[in-house]
Each structure stands twice: as structure tokens, then as C-alpha cells.
Image (cartoon, helix red, strand yellow):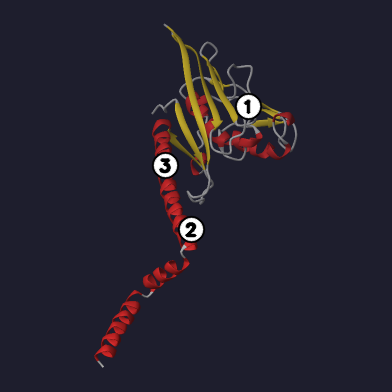
Amino acid sequence: MEKPSLQLLEVREPGVGHDERAVWLAVHRHAWQRSEPEGVQEAGITLMMERCDVARGEPGFGDTAEFCGYYDGRQQRVSITGRHLDAGAVDLPKGLRGLHLGSYAMSEVARWAKQWSDATVEPIFVSDGDAYPENHARRNRLYAQLGLQFAFEDPDGIQGRSLPMPTSQLCVPNSWTAFVTEHPMLKTFAEHVQAVADLKREQRWSRATVDGFVQRQRWADEHPLRACLGRLWVLHRMRTYLLFIAGLFALALWRAL
């Protein structure tokens, strides 16, 4: 089933309750193709991600990411990392790492690429410069989840290229589903607007309650004796009533004598 072009992603660690703050990202998915009478000549997909929660920084400062795929029907080749066969890379800004967004996006690109089952996956080159030192292992695990195998030039798996494989053998990992939840854009937006309206209504009620308390406190400060008697009446209403009756009875008895 084709996914909508606009979605919201909610990222949470497993076991984290909904009271904890999540990471929210807007995703724009754009797929296109150019066809001729003999078939599809080329096609592509782009996933644009942008963080949209309260922790989002200034635009252009590490809160956006782009993932692309490209199909060349004439050569029957597919790139799962770029807009063209000879270009492309997988990169996440520092602020979006560790959120399983790479697994999510690459699984979407792989799912799209598998429709060209007779095509060959364009080799992917990895090097020391395309990942931070602490991120090499994570990068390699991501590609391994897609079914790619690499011929590395070093024992640490830092630099090398992927081996040729047909797109039909690409894997579509779903490990991201434990962390990332897809939401329809318009419905989720409407729910958040309603939640904000409810919070504002509760805030107005709370403010009115506090204002009423402040006014009563000011009156009590200006009329301490009346406030004290009123408080005694509220706290000891029955006792005060009985004492009042007893006093009236005593006064009546005293007059009778």
C-alpha cells in the first residue's frame, strides 16, 4: 500500500511512557517516474525529514535530513543512496543520530527499489570520512540490515565497497518499528491543536481559581476577625451551632430564674 506523501514520525525509546517527551519529525515523501512506450525509463524517490518538536533548533542547523533513491531503466540499475547513479551518500546531522531514522529511511528506499526486481543495486562506497569514528559500526549494521555485503580494505570495516546484488535480494528492515511510529499528518495536527485548546481552557480555569483565592485572602487580611469567625464556622459548624443553642437556652433559663 502506498504511503501518504506527508507524515509525522514519533520517536520514543521502548518502554518510555507517553508522559516523557518524544522527538517529532515531519516527513515529505516524493516518488516520481518518467515513462515511455517501452516502459519506465527512470524513477526516483526522496524522503525529506525535518524536526518539528519544541527542541527543534534554528532552520538549517542540523534538524533536517534527506534520503534519495534513483532507478535507471535503460541500464537496469538502482541507487539507494542518491539522486543519480554516480552520486549520493547517507548522512544524518548530529542532532538526529541515534533515533533510528537511518533504518527507517533506508527501509523506505529499499521497499521502493524492490519494485524494479530485474535491476542491479549500484555499489555503495564507504570510507573513513563518511562516518564519525564512533559511528562506523552503526553504519555497517545499517547496510547489513539491507542485505548488502561489503568487500572491505581493512580489518575494521572502515573502507570498502558493496558487492553487486539484484534489487530482489534487498531486505526491508523493520527494526525501526520498535522506536518510530508513523502518524497521518492532518489527523495528528488536529489532535495536537485540540490538545492545546484543552490545555488553554484548563489554564483559564486554574487562573480563575487562583484569582478567587487571592481575592479571598486579601479580604481576610482586611477583615481578620470576620475571617476568623467565618473559618471557625466552616470548620466547627455543628459545634458552633450547638454552643449557640446552648447559650440561648442558658440565657432563657437565667431570665426565667
Q: Quadrant of the C terminus?
A: bottom left
Which residue is disc 2 drawn over?
A: 218
Q: Residue at x 30, y 84 (%)?
A: 246
Q: What element carries label 1?
A: loop
Mark 2 or 3: the one toward you: 2
Of 95 and 194, nearer the camera is: 194
Of 188 and 27, nearer the camera is: 188
CA neighbours of label 2 inside 10 A, class few (<14), some (14 to 19), many (20+): few
Q: Residue at x 73, y 29 (%)?
A: 129
Which residue is disc 3 drawn over?
A: 195
* Sequence-first disc among 3 and 1: 1
Indicate left or right for 37 with 110 as reference: left
Could you tell me the amino acid type at mark 3? Ala
Residue 165 quadrant: top right
Indicate left or right for 124 with 221 as reference: right
Q: How far apart are marks 2 and 1 (CA)?
A: 52 Å
Kindly give the residue lying farthest to the bottom in the view shown.
257
Q: Where is residue 30 in the image (x, y as percent from the top left)?
A: 48, 21
Q: Position of residue 124 (x, y in %)?
A: 64, 25
Q: Residue at x 68, y 30 (%)?
A: 151
CA neighbours of label 1 inside 10 A, class few (<14), some (14 to 19), many (20+): few
Could you tell me the amino acid type at mark 1? Gly
Indicate left or right for 135 with 201 as reference: right
Q: What element carries label 2?
A: helix
* Sequence-first disc among 2 and 3: 3
Of 27 and 57, nearer the camera is: 57
Q: Which residue is drawn at 47% across and 56% down?
A: 214
Which disc is residue 60 wearing? Answer: 1
